[in-house]
Image (cartoon, rainbow, N blue to C red):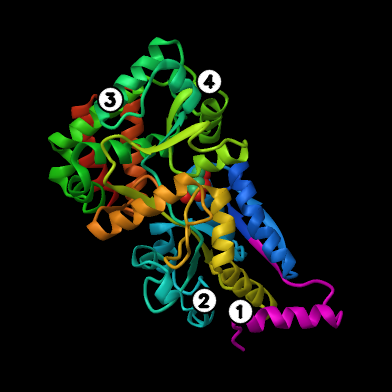
Amino acid sequence: MKFSAKAGVSALAISLAAGAAAQAADVEVLHWWTAGGEAAALNVLKENLEAQGIGWQDMPVAGGGGEAAMTALRARVTAGDPPTAVQMLGFDILDWANQGEVLANLNDVAAEENWDEVIPAAIQKFSKPGENWIAAPVNVHSTNWVWANKPMLDELGIAEPTTWDEFIAALQKAKDAGKVALAHGGQPWQDATMFDSAVLATGGAEFYQKAMIDLDPEALGGKQMVQAFDKMSQLREFVDDNFSGRDWNLASAMVINDEAAFQIMGDWAKGEFINAGKVPGTDFLCFRVPGTGDFVTFNSDQFVMFQQSDEEATAAQNAMASAIESPEFQIAFNKVKGSVPARTDVSGDELDDCAKKGMEQLAAASESGNLLGSMAHGHANPAAVKNAMYDVITAHFNGEYDSQTAAEEMVNAVEAAQ
Ligand code: GAL
């Protein structure tokens, strides 16, 4: 029997009302949302499902960017015991879609709720790679943001920088004043998050597309790539001595707690500021990494559904997918998460100023061909290539390669990974 979302939910409701089933089916959800703002956002989903009588089994795997979560997932699937739903990014979804019959098919819910029309093509590419909807997109994040401590900038007389050089001058001013200028955690995915912006600030959308997405060896190993690495070397001057291995949310906390001036991070960082009661424009500033203002590097968290063996579990899964795409949920969740809705037909009126700005920039970038998948967050190329790039970027950031060598290594590493 096929379950539509509504049929699934009402079947559950009836069985609950009749006392026929002691417990409605649960969903087991594998994710890496363990930071304060992330957990608060996940709670919105959990409570939504619980209100429908669907229990939540939590399977958190800490580690920003999700690499550890993907390793845990492989172990579960290999053991023949996949979770119901798994948080996943771009090309990882496509990798699973190519694994044969492991993913569930959400076409009934999608058709009933018209997902084809309301989910933008850049995201559908991953949630519906062929005929079938296999994932429910929950948000759109973007990675080329700076988060700044506004009172600290005011105190130091630093205006919001609008060019890369102004940004470097602002970082220098903060450093000279004895502050940590750039809050950063030295983990490969965080280094790569800054690298998304270093590439964009160097050669704009055209260079980013050629190097990061098309993997053109000339772009990967050329002069502009050397310049992008030079930008990373500039940033390296402004991190504190303890940056190595630090979690991203602890870096955000340094800005929140007046210990640091700036952080370059995706807009999930805003979830931390909001969770700490901070107000955009008053306590903190959000702006695109100077030099990348016309472009947006995006990623979208999706819940990929794995095939379940019994009908109740499938019904709960469909209900979860339906809940995720409901316009009300999209607003409630993204307000807390720091991202913006994954649907094009949801108004941003209720969102904060950073999210409003983010939504406008996303729409404009999408119109002008300047919306690009984030390499750091799995939206530019498959994990093998992404990880190969991570290695080079981190080795360079830690001083193992100079910029010229790093550009050469990008070519070699990407070639070997393909
Ligand atoms: C990203 C993900 C975000 C956020 C971040 C840090 O890859 O898309 O939702 O969780 O990692 O954990």
Q: Is residue 365 left or right of residue 340?
A: left
The answer to whether marks 4 and 1 mark residues whose Cβ atoms lie closer than 8 Å is: no
- The residue sitting at 39% across, 18% down in the picture is 157
Residue type at the position of mark 1: Ala
- Distance from disc 2 to disc 3, alpha carbons, whole Å, reads 48 Å
* The stretch drawn in magenta includes residue 26: yes
- Which is nearer the N-term, disc 4 or disc 3? 3
- Res. 259 mark: 4
- The residue sitting at 36% across, 25% down in the picture is 159
Q: Magenta part of the protein: which range?
A: 1-28
Whether disc 2's CB lies below 8 Å from ligand 1 is answered: no
- Name the mark nearer the viewer: 4 or 1: 4
Residue type at the position of mark 4: Glu
* The stretch drawn in magenta includes residue 129: no
Q: Is residue 91 left or right of residue 65?
A: left
The residue sitting at the right extreme is 19
- Which is nearer the N-term, disc 2 or disc 4? 2
Q: Secondary structure at mark 4?
A: loop
Whether disc 3's CB lies below 8 Å from ligand 1 is answered: no
Question: Relative to 58, is 226 above or below?
Answer: above
Residue annotated with mark 1:
5
- Distance from disc 4 to disc 1, alpha carbons, whole Å, reads 48 Å
Residue annotated with mark 2:
106
- Distance from disc 4 to disc 3, alpha carbons, whole Å, reads 21 Å
Residue 94: % across, % down? 39, 64
- Distance from disc 1 to disc 3, alpha carbons, whole Å, reads 52 Å
- Name the mark nearer the viewer: 2 or 4: 4
Q: Secondary structure at mark 3?
A: helix
Residue annotated with mark 3:
166
